[in-house]
Image (cartoon, helix red, strand yellow):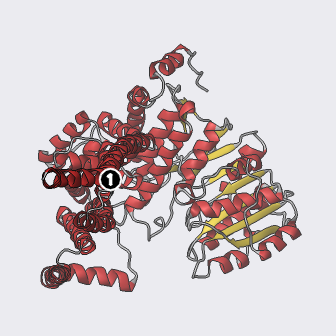
Amino acid sequence: MNNSSIPLTPETEELLGAVRSADILVGIPSFNNAGTIGHVVRAVGAGLAKYFHGHRAVLVNADGGSTDDTPAIVAHTMVDLEPLFISDRQSTLHRIVTPYHGIPGKGSAFRTIFEVARRLKVKACAVVDSDVRSITPEWMELLLHPIIKEGYDYVAPYYRRHKYDGTITNSIAYPLTRALYGQEVRQPIGGDFGFTGELAQHYLEKHVWESDVARFGIDIWMTTEAITSGAKVCQSFLGAKIHDPKDPAADLSSMLRQVVGALFALMEAHASSWMSVTDSRKVPLFGFQYEVGVEPVNVNVERMVDLFHLGLTDLRDIWARILSEDALDQLSRLREVPIRDFRIPDSLWAKIIYDAALAHHRSVLPQEHLLKALTPLYLGKTASFVLDSQGLTTAEAEHLIEALCRTFEKQKEYLVTRWPQSHDAREVIGAAHARPERSQP
Amino acid sequence: MTSNWEHTLLGPVAALGERVFTILPNVLAMIILLLVGLGVAWGMGHLTERLLRVIGLDRLCDRIGIAAAMLRGGIKSDPSYIIGRITYWLIVIFATTASLGALDVAPINQAAHSLLSYIPHLVTAAVIGIIGYLVSNFVSQAVLIAAVNAGLPPARWIAAGTRWGIQLLTVAMALEQLGIAQHIVVVGFGITWGGLVLAAALALGLGGKDLAKDFLERRLAGHSRSPINEDLRHL
């Protein structure tokens, strides 16, 4: 257990002394989000006033040294409650705008938010991205109500997104998390979450803040830690997710490295949790579901396939050390296939991800090289998904993702039988099959 | 008469015997030093090999591609075994030199002294060579992956150039340590490196000016463009 507190600035300490305690905390990490954060602050303020009047609430902005007016906008944005028919205008929304310490990234910002939550002994927390354009006051109710009223510990978001939006989520994070831990959390790296004060304390006690968790790995880490710690998990339907592109300075291979690196590191840490899981179950979903119009997404399939082919030619030696012979053979056959017929089947993709996880486990390559070498493979799978889902609606494309998830679950034994080195995996699998199947909610 | 004969015949034998008796302790010391040295070399060689296996050197070499490179070069032994053997032979050389010194013969002493004073240079050059080789493999692999992810078709050439550049620098540094044709190495390295930079500058200026222009525009104007597609949101 780590009881040492995270250093905060004297101004923040002073504010914490003035506020002393709170019931609800909403955290917003930011870095140069002057264009969008005002809207986020207004939505949070209105949502708290509308749905949680009478509760002591605090808004915490952990900023990574923005050079625009982001902190000033958070501090001074006014929330006009009159047009929203909100009668309670007495409750004060305390605002704490603070810089964060540590590795620059979203995870480090969250760490500061967790620390403030711990100091104020809050009961419920929510975090929302500072670049979300589609946030409404209802998001506060949807993220916090299950914690305060329904006894849940962790609320993951559930969005309507364009079929080509969130491709790392759809092709890796969701299928792998679901197959490993057996819970169907559709947006495990959504970025907008609700959780208890106790869970925030649990997060703080982990020594992960010098790893990828301090950056884009934070979202998958929070979800996985919540699941493996035995927290009661649910989802809330938040409608559309329309946001600015993620950190413009971050390139694809860095994002992929951080998310997949965090996923694989979590597999190492929680091997005993996922080894015995053989099926998945639905996670309760709150909120009124409706269809929304989503922004069109332009995709350049040809460019993605070209990059895959470049990888197949130049990274073959590296892939040969990561992938099984069979997977590499199947990939090699795609060299001569015309673009319209280019497909990476679900079974091959599941095998590639499991092979990569095993290679990571065995440390066959420096971690950075291994994870970044997956970029052309990921682009190949994304191109394949785009070609498969051409002409399909977002709802229809969702069936393809569901099929991919089932393939990951079906092939999990491939991973489990190759994972352990010190003991016989068959014992683990045998024990898992001997267990009664979990009931569907 | 008898005394003369005795003196003439037995004198050299006595002198030889005296010499032998003088040198015998030195020879014995040499043999003892050599035997002890061989024993220590055998023990240290095995100990080093064991220790390196325990700390997982072979696994590390496998990870960073040294094992594969060695295999490509026809070396089938583990790195731990090779370093163990190197340790053995270094101690053997040291013990042999020390044991020859025990004979106390001036020319041998001088040769042994020269050999001993050269060993640190030899070891430094070997360390430079090994580190240079490791760094060149690691960096060229990183460059290859980055170049492929950036969609640069000559990724393999860029990676190979990086590897050879680092290895060239390593060889130059190692030869300088060994004191072999120091000036020729420095001049040769300068000419080769200068030539490479000039060739790269010409190639970029003539063949890739649009690429350079695009790169500088993005850097200086602060425009960030995804190499794949602007619209696709991965997270």
User: A413 left or right of A93?
Assistant: left
Name the residue located 72 percent from the left edge and 77 percent from the top edge.
A75
Question: B115 and A43: which one is in front?
Answer: B115
* Location of residue A368 in the rendering, given as x and y in whole percent from the top left corner: 40, 55
Quarter of the rendering containing residue A270: top right
* Location of residue A163 in the rendering, given as x and y in whole percent from the top left corner: 40, 50
- Can you identify the residue that label 1 sits on? B26
* Location of residue A111 in the rendering, given as x and y in whole percent from the top left corner: 66, 59
User: B85 left or right of A264?
Assistant: left
Quarter of the rendering containing residue A352: top left
Amino acid type at image mark 1: Asn
Question: B170 and A159: which one is in front?
Answer: B170
Residue A305 visible somewhere in the drawing:
no
Which of the chains bears the disc numbered 1? B
Give the total of numbered labels. Answer: 1
Quarter of the rendering containing residue A8: bottom right
Q: Is residue A83 above or below residue A72?
A: above
User: B127 left or right of A412?
Assistant: left
Residue A274 visible somewhere in the drawing:
yes
* Location of residue B166 in the rendering, given as x and y in whole percent from the top left corner: 26, 69
Mark 1 residue crowding within 10 angstroms, few (<14) / some (14–19) / many (20+): some
Name the residue located 84 percent from the left edge and 57 percent from the top edge.
A55
Name the residue located 32 percent from the left edge and 47 percent from the top edge.
B28
Disc 1 secondary structure class: helix
